Amino acid sequence: MIESKIVDAHVETYIKTLLPIETGLLGALEVYANHNNVPIIQPEIAQYIKVFFKIAKPRAVLEIGTAIGYSGALMALEMGSGTIDTIELSETMVAKAAETFAALKNSVPLVDVTQHLGSALAVIPTLNKRFDLIFIDASKGHYREFFDLCYPMLNDGGVIISDNVLYKGMIATNLYLVKRKITIVKRMRKYLAFISEHPELETTILPMGDGLAISYKKGGNA
């Protein structure tokens, strides 16, 4: 396991002591993920998304990378009403996420979750929809490709959230680089430079969790 160098370990531990303990469905999913070594968003990222959704109030969300449905469920609970389209390559993960979203339905009956099985690079072009928020949390080597496909579907004033963009600190400096990850690191560096310099975006990169990029689409009146 690669040690993260993004945030001082003592600071990270302290921040996590301030986070609420999840119960109910989200708490059960955290236990499942821990026992089965399934990667889900880190607690501080989950809390950030909760706060962000309360502020931005998106009603149409595209999620690239469903896994067991943890982040999708978290977003649905914060939305209260709206739609989520979520894409996942693994049939096993899709089946588990289907259980998650079925259990979620009674809590948020006004959120319509549509699961898509397959490669995001193949699925995204089939979607004829507009989104207020796009959450990218899939193969780190393909973020730019995901962006190019889904950006035209993002409404003006919408946001793209890209998770894991600092990748244990390796993106920031070669001092932390693991050689077998060099291709992913190079591609992620190019992606972060691209969204940071994009004329239609306002982007900030946060050193929390495994790195989070928030990109706001300014639109024609910005």
Image (cartoon, rainbow, N blue to C red):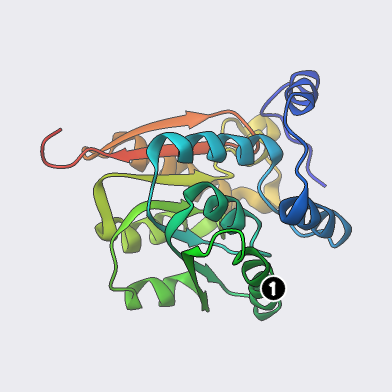
Q: Quadrant of residue 25?
A: bottom right
> Relative to 38, is 188 on the left or the right?
left
Residue at x-position 73% and y-position 35%: 4
Between 33 and 193, the residue placed more toward the observer is 33
Element class at badge 1: helix
Residue at x-position 42% and y-position 77%: 122
Q: Position of residue 132 (x, y in %)?
A: 33, 51
**Residue extending farthest left:** 221
Which quadrant, please, contains the C terminus? top left
Q: Position of residue 84 (x, y in %)?
A: 46, 63
Between 136 and 177, the residue placed more toward the observer is 136
Amino acid type indicated by mark 1: Glu
Q: Position of residue 101 (x, y in %)?
A: 62, 68
The residue at which mark 1 appears reads as 99
> Relative to 218, is 202 on the left or the right?
right
> Relative to 74, is 114 on the left or the right?
left
**199 shown above or below 110:** above
Residue at x-position 55% and y-position 59%: 108
- Label count reads 1
Between 93 and 138, the residue placed more toward the observer is 93
For label 1, the crowd category at 10 Å Cα-Cα, with few meaning under 14, some 14 to 19 and many 20 or more, is few
> Relative to 159, is 186 on the left or the right?
right
**170 shown above or below 59:** above
Residue at x-position 61% and y-position 49%: 182
Q: Quadrant of residue 217?
A: top left
**Residue extending farthest right:** 35
Q: Position of residue 16 (x, y in %)?
A: 76, 28
Between 85 and 199, the residue placed more toward the observer is 85
